Image (tube, rainbow, N blue to C red):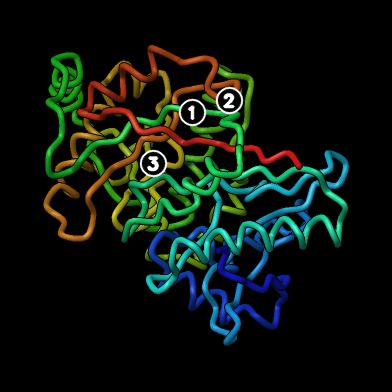
Amino acid sequence: MTTFCIASPYGPSEKSRWDDFVEASRNATFLFRRDFMDYHADRFVDASLMFEDAHGRLKGLLPASLHLAEGEVRSHGGLTYGGFLLSPATHAQEVEGMLLAARDFYVRHFGIHRIIFRPIPSIYHRMPADDELYWFFRYGMKLTACTLSSTVHLQHPAPFAELRRRGVRRAERNGLCVEEASDAMAWREFWTVLADVLALRHDRHPVHSIEEMLLLRERFPENIALFVVREGTASGRIVGGTVLFFSAPVVHAQYISASDAGCRMGALDLLFHTILKTYSESSVYTYFDFGISTEDNGHFLNTGLNAQKEGFGARSVVYNTYTWDF
């Protein structure tokens, strides 16, 4: 028998309650804190839900955005992943109740005919939290995207490829050094490198502007950091770097870039050699996630990029998307 759950829309007055639940959740990351979700509130119509049991106890959250033109709700349109956020006290049958309550709420209030879920990959879970995947199967949802990410188990990595080891030695011979950026000037210099590389090599631009990243860094100083590779001393030119998101047990590379000079000198090889060695000694973090190497919802694999990440000792994790058509 389905466990009954009551769905109510998130509103600003619920911010503290929402954030407290995220902090105690078994599968949420800091991306679901309202100060992160709402930085781009002007681009998305929030349709997030909160779920209570019959006794008024908060059992789950659904970060979501409304896309009326497509007749759908997405969890979440502005985030890498979404799905149901669950407490340690939430049971599997209650997740079924949340699923049905969400469907009924969205149909009744918005007339939508589809929900798209991007569940949080299991490497981010602090406790097992695959409840929703079972109910997605039971209710016949379709797997509509499968993107391939590359992840290092920090305590049990695969060995570095010889090509990557040679790159580390080349970077050391060239006098490159790795440091954590300490000021906005370094962030802006790296963002210029990143934007130039994306524009010239991929005809793209960063998802976040530098002003957005500095804002998020200010809001989440414990969760967002920039590591850069410089020529020579601390005042040398930045030739590569990566923005890291920290969501225990995962360190995630949100952006990775190196200039042409940095590529020739082995900047990224030294960068990830240093970072992986540093966090392999941590008792907090288990995985380092490089992010996806696929395009077109997973139908195209950038084999060169994937091989580069595997050369650092990474192996595959998938980010799935499920579609529920009513």
Between the residue at mark 1 and the residue at mark 3, the CA separation in whole angstroms equals 16 Å
- As displayed, is residue 260 above or below residue 76? above
What kind of residue is marked 2?
Asn
Q: Where is residue 299 in the image (x, y as percent from the top left)?
A: 54, 16
Q: Where is residue 148 in the image (x, y as percent from the top left)?
A: 42, 27
Q: Earlier in the sequence, mark 3 or mark 2?
A: 3
- Judge from the rendering whether residue 156 lies leftward or rightward of residue 111; answer left or right: left
Q: Find disc 3 in the rendering and name its residue.
A: 253
Between the residue at mark 1 and the residue at mark 2, the CA separation in whole angstroms equals 6 Å
Q: Which of marks 1 and 3 is nearer the N terminus?
A: 1
**Please, what secondary structure does the residue beneath circle 2 have?**
helix
- Quarter holding the C terminus is top right
Q: Are marks 1 and 2 in contact (CB under 8 Å)?
A: yes
Q: Which of marks 3 and 2 is in front?
A: 2
- As displayed, is residue 23 above or below residue 308? below
Q: Which of marks 1 and 2 is nearer the N terminus?
A: 1
Furthest residue toward bottom:
55
**Mark linked to residue 230:** none
The one nearer the camera, 206 or 59, is 59
Q: Position of residue 289 (x, y in %)?
A: 34, 40
